[in-house]
Image (cartoon, grey):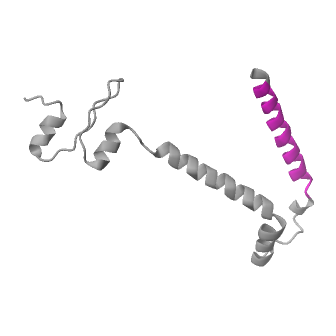
């Protein structure tokens, strides 16, 4: 497993070096070239670089789906709070389920029924 991780690191480093070499060798960076117009930029993105635009769109959509998956909260206490139900939390070391307070008296019951 360590060998595979080491090979992946070497592969990423080689890819970065190749991309840097190709970027620096590109002759479009000279100061004599004209900046692109809006139409030439659109043609370049949608015609010359269409596959890279699709790949970038897929990567961004995967990142947004992953972010929404990480943000969601499926704990039993929060699911029952949304449904307005009181349910017992299973005895697996989870905190007690939240109960929705119905009145000011409900606030003392939500604290474990302790009276002051």
**Identity of the residue drawn at 31% across and 48% down:** 82
Of all residues, the one furthest to the left in this rendering is 116
Q: Quadrant of residue 87?
A: top left
The answer to whether residue 60 is magenta is no
Q: Quadrant of the C terminus?
A: top left
**In this picture, residue 39 sits left or right of residue 65:** right
- In this rendering, the answer to whether 39 lies above or below 51 is below
**In this picture, residue 107 sits left or right of residue 46:** left
Question: Magenta span: helix, strand or loop, mainly?
Answer: helix
Q: Quadrant of residue 114?
A: top left
Residue 85: x and y in percent read: 25, 44
**11 or 24: nearer the eye?**
11
Q: Quadrant of the N terminus?
A: top right
Residue 44: x and y in percent read: 81, 69
Residues in magenta, as a range = 4-26
- In this rendering, the answer to whether 4 lies above or below 59 is above
């Amino acid at each position: 497993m360590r060998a595979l991780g080491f090979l992946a690191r070497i592969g990423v480093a080689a890819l970065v070096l190749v991309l840097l070499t190709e970027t620096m060798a590109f002759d479009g960076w000279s100061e004599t070239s004209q900046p692109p117009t809006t139409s030439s930029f659109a043609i370049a993105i949608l015609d010359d670089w269409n596959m890279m635009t699709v790949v970038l769109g897929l990567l961004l959509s995967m990142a947004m789906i992953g972010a929404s998956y990480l943000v969601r909260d499926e704990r039993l206490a929060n699911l029952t709070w949304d449904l307005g139900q009181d349910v017992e939390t299973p005895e697996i070391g989870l905190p007690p389920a939240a109960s929705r307070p119905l009145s000011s008296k409900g606030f003392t019951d939500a604290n474990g029924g302790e009276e002051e």
